[in-house]
Image (cartoon, helix red, strand yellow):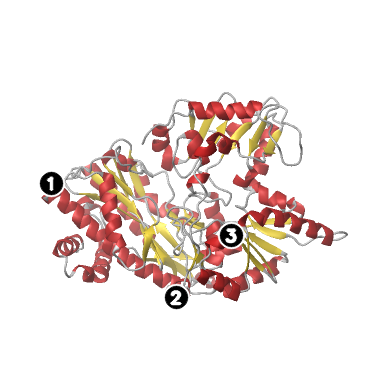
Amino acid sequence: MVTVNTTSRLAALRSLMKERKVDVYGTDALPPTPPGVVVPSEDSHASEYVAACDGRRAFISGFSGSAGTAVVTLEKAALATDGRYFNQASKQLDTNWTLLKQGLQDVPTWQEWAADESAGGKTVGIDPTLVPSSVAEKLSESIKKNGGTGLEAVSENLVDLVWGSERPARPSEPIKLLAEKYSGKDSAFKLTELRKELEKKKSVGFVVSLLDEVAWLFNLRGSDIAYNPVFFSYAIVTQDSATLYADSSKLTPEAQSYLADNKITVKPYDELFADTKVLASQAAANGEGSTPKKYLISTKASWALKLALGGDKFVEEVRSPVGDAKAIKNETELNGMRQCHIRDGAALTEFFAWLEDQLINKKAVLDEVAAADTLEEIRAKHQDFVGLSFDTISSTGANAAVIHYKPEKGSCGIIDPNAIYLCDSGAQFFDGTTDTTRTLHFGTPTQAEKTAYTLVLKGNIALDSAVFPKGTSGFAIDALARQFLWKSGLDYRHGTGHGVGSFLCVHEGPIGIGTRKQYIDVPLTAGNVLSIEPGYYEDGAYGIRIENLAIVREVKTEHSFGDKPYLGFEHVTMVPYCRNLIDVSLLTEDEKKWLNDSSKEILANTEHFFKDDPLTHKWLIRETQPF
């Protein structure tokens, strides 16, 4: 990880803050003092991962992690990120920046830091397309309470101006139809279900702003953002119309025909905001003398979108009904997740057998990138493979302690056969999305490493085995995965699980397992697919994570207290666990049975791939032997 010198970039940004006239939504006047500038990670669609042209926060700060917010004043600059990225950010940020480690005691949030810096009548500016309206409104209140003048919606992005001609071009990749044999439901059915929700809410329509929601709703896929099969788009759905805002020249003939058959109108991507202002005017005219019906937007929709639709009077922010529907996979999607994980499990098994052979038997010298490249080549041989679902985390020794480590050629580590090797990787298949982490040791691990690995494994088993009543949230069961680490005074600084899309984003809301507020509000539901991934990280030494994907399913119980269904997990990941790192003395009989049953299942599902591959077959047999 290279530290980027941001001195000249910050100087150029501050020059704009002082000298350039800044147009602000709602007024032509300049802010009373040059504003501080907030630079989020996300794009206009609240995407976690963004196209290169939208990597503004990475450009201005040098920090390349997927989560974080930069705040720049005339004298200071701060970067806030969560525990997954403390290690990485500390290495990538130069001396111009203060790192705000979110979640640690007495460390301010970026909102608090920005509000504190606004004291004395200063204004904070932000591109309103890059921040949700709820965040903007709370920040504005906080700024005013601290003596600032408020938050200004700046009509041009100052970081883009600094970036200038070096800013990458916006992608223009094809938009393709996803066949119903993979999607399970056609777009007409999905639109009908959405319109039922609109009727319940007595709303005019829903403006779809998240890219994966548009892709899912219309059964389309693209590749405008690396590893995410989405495309730049918006949509507006009412009771009698559906409009897709996207570059029509990118649509394949098959996609164009499908949209036409489903009575979906296509308009240019850039016309969305002009159309929403027209809709706002119509709503205002229709609502004279009465309470107007409102448009629904997601709580993740941008402040700019809410302003364009006329603000609170004409807009209601809700948890997206499209997001909720997308998170509950149909049987076609669930079967696709099972099948693609069998193929993906075979690929990982072949890779780990190959890697061990190279390191131990052939004494090969391999760096982390070379290993990741080989894994991708192996995956690509399998049916329905499209590409990776994120940058492979191939990490040896101390690098494994960097939770979201990204190896880069020329600066990555050489894999040490006498150290822990952590591989977190995934793929996009037409029938599903995978995400698996395995931690291995090819030599003789220390007792501390074996103990930590086994405590993490016990947490994974406990959560995988859990049974809970319908209505239980991911927040409520998070402790099941941490309990064994906690007993030893250990923990990890990331969530325990995230939702996963069906040939969509590898991180999918609104469900998850962890301590985030949103996980309190959203119960787990049969048909959800999410990860179970406890871990432990010893900075400067090693990192351990074990990650499986699991389907939430209804389970049979002896009783049914409260007449509620009970739910549990069906794991779909088919990759052995590292026997070399398991301290069997720490396992209960039930845990050993779970491990043996899982190994038997993995062997049965993947052994046939290796009938002509004795190296991998021998490795698989060894790693799935019962305890």
**CA neighbours of label 3 inside 10 A, class few (<14), some (14 to 19), many (20+):** many
| Picture residue at 46% right of the left edge, 73% below the top | 179
Q: Say which amino acid is labelled 2.
A: Lys
Please tell me whether mark 3 or mark 1 is closer to you in this view: 3
| Picture residue at 49% right of the left edge, 49% below the top | 51
| Picture residue at 12% right of the left edge, 49% below the top | 362
Which sits earlier in the primary sequence, circle 3 or circle 1?
3
Read off the residue under disc 2: 181
Tell me where residue 168 appears, x and y as whole percent. Answer: 49, 44
Helix, strand or loop at label 2? It is: helix
Q: Which mark is residue 547?
A: none
Which sits earlier in the primary sequence, circle 3 or circle 2?
2
Q: Say which amino acid is labelled 3.
A: Ala
Give the distance between the C-alpha atoms of the residues marked 3 and 1, in whole angstroms. Answer: 52 Å
| Picture residue at 18% right of the left edge, 49% below the top | 442
**Residue 380 visible, this angle:** yes
